[in-house]
Image (spheres, rainbow, N blue to C red):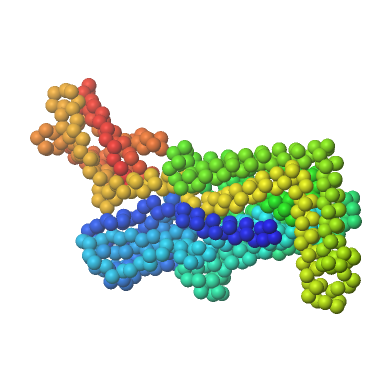
Amino acid sequence: MRRLPALLLLVAGLLGTALSGTASAHSALTGSDPADGAVVATAPQRVTLTFSEQVALGDDGIRVLEPSGKRADSGELRDLCSGPVVRYGVDLRDGLPDGTYTVAWQAVSADSHPISGAFTFSIGEPSATEVVLPRQEAGGGLVGQLYDIGRYVSYAGFTVLAGGSAFVLVCWPRGASVRPVRRLVAYGWVAFTAATLALLMLRGPYTGSGRLGDAFDPGVLQGVLDTRTGAALTSRLLLAGVAALFVAALFGPYARREGPGDRRDLVYGLAAGGTVVAAGIAGTWALSEHASTGVQPALAMPLDVLHLLAVAAWLGGLAALAVALYREPSIERAAVGRFSRLAFGAVAVLAATGLYQSWRQVGSWSALTGTAYGRLLLLKLGLVAVLLGVGWVSRGWTRRLAEPARGASHGADDESRAEETGAEETGAAESGPGTGAGPVPDAGVADPVRAAQLARQRAAVATARRRRVRDADPARAGLRRSVLAETAVVVVLLAVTTALTTTEPGRTQEQVDRAQAVGATAVPDRPVDVTLPFDTGGPDGTGTVRLTLDPGRSGANALRVDVDGTDGRARDVAELKVSFTLDEREIGPLAIALDKDAPGRWTARSARLPLPGDWRIRVTVRTSDIDQTTIDKNVKIG
């Protein structure tokens, strides 16, 4: 138990590393022009990339490479974002030869996670390429593993620091002078501060080169400080310094106060100051990660702060209680009862904020089971259910501790008997072997070996006495076992929770999957041609309608409509209407204004489709005053 705080932090880090394989970025490439694998007849003027949410790209965020490996782009990044569409591009040089070109890109999503990828397209016809791209993705390798460990240790350190301090202030003021509890909180502060500093140094190579040596490059560090995540980590490090002053006051003047009523202003000051510092630290996560992007960020960020504070109060306080029950068995029953009430309030806050966060990040029942985020969330809910079950057992032991009949008499008798037994064993240990005449007089001065032997005996007797006192109350022993079981579940729960912060939210993942599915089936490199036979039912009422949508992707398109008779020649009709509807998004019908160019020939130069998806084309043909028909066909637009 002496090494329990360090062990908890270490296990949390190791479990976090094991779970880091499920993590993915929170923005994704949803489309490109040219598309992956496309073959175009002539070199495009520009290469564009479309993302699911806002990203940050550096000067070399998009690189286009010729088959020989030379740069084919101008190197100037263009921001082509418009409304909800996140699109960036680079212009290509003139006179590019035919062959297969490689597009490599690297960016940082809005919630601080690096993303990267590559694809190819061909001009004229495919060819061999000499381009060799690194296999390691952004945020991977040794730097990625170290960064993941740092992330988990910082969460664990903050939980122990804030929760242990709250346990002392709210539940057990005497704990401020108990060495094991003080050591636990100090371990939490050291782990949190060291992990934050490591994250700040590793941020540059984590989102950039991936080389560990760049962590010590001042230029790379300066670039990190100019980003939102760098500012959040710097603020967190400064708040860690303020937290050190708080811990010093908690275990200094507060621990040395003369009585419960002394220095009440110090108690209130520490409570208010500690809450502000803890909320500030939690705010650095809320402002730079999940809560700052997606749906309703203005509401999500303060609720995320409350969620983190409730996690710290419950789980960090539980770790402090476990240490106190094992290392300081004289902890008052009232303190255990106060923590039980504090934990109940924290669980209530967690339930409310967690329900909102789950809706915000998952969004649908299918995402709950069909995405990595949803499955991790189900695992977390299962662990919380187990934790609540064990907590219910702990509350039962807490109520037994509060029973006056056993708490007032039996506990005192057990402790006094243990002390008397310990005193007898101490006297026996100090008696010389075979003398039968009491303690050895001042043996430590004359015989150092004998003095060391007596010191070991006294330590063994003292340890036995503490164990007897600790185990004298069955309710207290049962509470220790249940709290230890809770702590073991907490270690795994904390690792799963931190893994969720690096996993693509289910709502976003489903949107990306839909967009990528549409992109895989659409034909963005050539016009979309649709031929629809019709029969209005009247005399000479049959024929075909042929529509050509160019370039056949979301945005502005040119539409050409040809109406032919059964003989294959152009034929005129009394009326022709065309509309587009995106049923899955409830968009449309969007009526297209057609200009008649010649008999049987119509064009529209402003057929604008706002989103990719499975669009339904509806064509109405009227061949006479009474003969009319409407025909539908679905086409996928990228």
The answer, for residue 244, to whether it is visible in the render is yes
Residue for point 86% across, 67% down: 435
Q: Which of 43 and 413 is in front in this view?
A: 413
Residue for point 85% across, 65% down: 431
Q: Nearer the viewer, residue 173 or 418?
A: 418
Q: Residue furthest top?
A: 626
The answer, for residue 555, to whether it is visible in the render is no
Q: Which of 436 and 295 is in front in this view?
A: 436
Rendered view: 260 above or below 140: above
Q: Which of 228 and 113 is in front in this view?
A: 113
Q: Quadrant of the rendered structure where residue 595 is?
A: top left
Relative placement, left or right, of 585 versus 542 is: right
* On-image quarter of the N terminus: bottom right
**Residue 289, position in %: x, y?**
56, 54
Residue for point 85% across, 45% down: 413
**Residue 162, position in %: x, y?**
70, 54
**Residue 355, position in %: x, y?**
58, 40
Rendered view: 595 above or below 465: above
